[in-house]
Amino acid sequence: MKRMIALAAACLLSGASAAQQPAPPRPAGTARIDLQRHDLSIAGWESLQALVTFEPGSTFPRHSHPGEEIIYVTEGSVDYEVDGKWLTVKAGEVLFIPNGTVHAARNTGTVRAAELATYIIEKGKPLLVLAE
């Protein structure tokens, strides 16, 4: 919570939007490569597509997004907690996470896992909000 307050304060002081500020540090063993970002034809919304990787044993804490996340697992398998329930999504499978839904991810396998994440999000808001 303190990190989010500090980020918000930095945005106000700098006059920049939260979306332009650096994201919180990523957990060890995870990485995100942004592939493309575009304004949508719906005012105030944009899309972001990213490749997210998870090394064996890595986890990403509970968080939410200011819009929908559409996930396609490209390799390995990823366990997702969505609204308190865990499910496993394997390579070639998809998952839809609704706007504002708290979720987490982990790779309990022995090989790297990856997902193609497509976000349909409100412009000017941080992509990620850590849950308390």
Image (cartoon, rainbow, N blue to C red):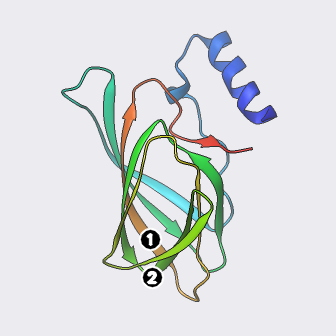
Q: Residue at x 66, y 44 (%)?
A: 130
* Direction from residue 120 to residue 109 in the image, left or right: right
Mark 1 and 2 residues: CB-CB less than 8 Å, in contact?
yes
* Residue closer to the observer: 62 or 57: 62
Residue type, mark 2 in image: Gly
Compared with 63, 129 (above or below) is: above
* Residue closer to the observer: 23 or 5: 5
Query: Image quadrant for the N terminus?
Result: top right
Separation of disc 1 and disc 2 at Cα? Answer: 7 Å
Residue 89 x, y percent position in the rendering: 44, 75
Task: Name the disc covering residue 38, or none.
Answer: none
Residue 66 x, y percent position in the rendering: 47, 35
Tell me the element at label 2: loop
Q: Residue at x 50, y 29 (%)?
A: 19
Tell me the element at label 1: strand
User: How many numbered discs, if any?
Assistant: 2
Task: Name the disc covering residue 114, or none.
Answer: 1
Residue type, mark 1 in image: Ala
Circle 2 sits on which residue?
Answer: 76
Query: Image quadrant for the C terminus?
Result: top right
